[in-house]
């Protein structure tokens, strides 16, 4: 699993002439980093007398962020796996008409999965941004900059994921599905850009 | 060393209530990711007949990006170490006047290092963006989105590093140095925002 590589190994494998891990994996990793930093801001607030009024809220943020972290560290792998399935589908036999149809279906299915994984990362990144905003507003002010970095990482996660959604959508023939997912990912892109500006405008470091 | 942690461990340690690794480490990691993805785009171009005209340029990009990757994966640790030195300086004895002066000098020196490390990360991130732009323009178009993700990661690296530069500058008493580094980091922030927009406007995925 890619999440079991050391940082050094992950960077080396990204840098190599193998296409995996690629930009989609960096997207998921950034979403996981955003979740982790949000969790840290909440954890640096919990259990301190001066922040008792927000204790329950911070526990909720820490738990939600931890759930996203654990999910997204697996999405690093899921993104790579989806791409490998696309490559595998292209290698299926295509002699008979039956084989051609089966191969074509497998390719289409693989591209759908390859679009859906980063779409999920982009959705999660927006939700993490909202958690980070709450942690910045009410959490320990000594960790405000860590919350701000969470927001920056979430933006990169969502916009990076959007590239990967669009690439895979461009190969899908189901025009209704393509139109629907294109609309959703473009909305997410705009949301993430607007939200980042709005949240970081409130951060004074 | 933080670069020797697995991705899972790095995320867990970031999430914990310990302040390290924090946002400054995420900044350096993102710069290293940007370098790695740039290197990959170049590596996916090198050695292919159809891109022979840009072969030498791509080798230069791959080499420069690899140098940044190796430097920046160590800056994850350097950022954490600088913060630990600040904490250590505050714990120095302060009974006699001599001790007070030595402690004060050590604190100031530690904050300078803690500002300088992320400043270096921000400078590197800009240079990596320029390399990524060249790789996107002339490299293998199948890897364009990976180059775009490199640009997104470099923006997060530079802006995240800028927060950490400013926090540490706010504790430094040498007003001339503070003015100089504030001017530089604010210029870098504007550059990175402008460059990202400019480069990504040319990317059609």
Image: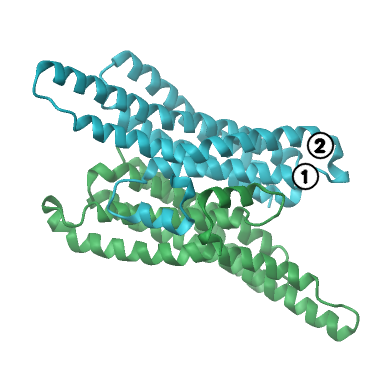
Chain colours: A cyan, B green
Q: Which residue in the protein does label 1 denote? A: A45
Residue depicted at x 59% and y 44%: A150
Up the image or down, A116 lies above or below A83; here it is: above
Instruction: Specify the quadrant of the image occupied by residue B103.
Output: bottom right
Q: Which residue is mark 2?
A: A55
For the residue carrying disc 1, how many other residues have a C-alpha within 10 Å: few (<14), some (14-19), or many (20+)?
many
Label 1: state its secondary structure: loop
Question: Which numbered circle lies on residue A96?
Answer: none
- B42 sits left or right of B201 in the view: left
Identify the mark nearer the N-term, 2 or 1: 1
Number of on-image labels: 2
Q: Chain of mark 1?
A: A
Is A171 drawn above or below residue B156 in the view shown? above
- Quarter holding the N terminus of chain A? top left
Asked if the residues shown at circle 2 and circle 1 are in contact, with their CB atoms under 8 angstroms apart, the answer is: yes
Q: Position of residue B84 (x, y in %)?
A: 69, 66
- Residue A115 in view in this figure: yes
Q: Depth check: give the residue in front, A169 or A189.
A: A169
Left of A172 or right of it: where is B84? Answer: right
The residue lying toward the viewer, choosing from B161 and B191, is B161
Q: What chain is tagged by disc 2?
A: A
On the image, the x and y values in percent for residue B41 come to 29, 51
């Amino acid at each position: 699993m890619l999440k079991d590589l050391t940082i050094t190994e992950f960077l080396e494998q990204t840098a190599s002439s193998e296409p995996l891990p690629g930009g989609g994996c960096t997207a998921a990793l950034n979403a996981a980093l955003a979740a982790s930093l949000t969790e840290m801001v909440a954890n640096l607030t919990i259990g301190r007398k001066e922040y008792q009024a927000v204790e329950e809220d911070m526990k909720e943020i820490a738990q939600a962020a931890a759930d996203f972290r654990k999910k997204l560290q697996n999405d690093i792998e899921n993104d790579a796996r989806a791409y490998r399935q696309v490559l595998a589908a292209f290698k299926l036999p295509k002699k008979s008409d039956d084989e051609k149809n089966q191969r074509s279906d497998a390719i289409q299915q693989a591209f759908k999965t390859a679009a859906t994984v980063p779409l999920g990362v982009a959705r999660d990144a927006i939700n993490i941004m909202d958690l980070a905003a709450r942690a910045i507003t009410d959490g320990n002010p000594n960790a405000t900059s860590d919350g701000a970095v969470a927001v920056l990482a979430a933006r990169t996660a969502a916009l990076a994921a959007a590239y990967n959604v669009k690439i895979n959508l461009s190969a899908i023939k189901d025009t209704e599905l393509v139109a629907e997912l294109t609309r959703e990912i473009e909305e997410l892109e705009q949301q993430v850009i607007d939200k980042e500006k709005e949240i970081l405008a409130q951060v004074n470091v």
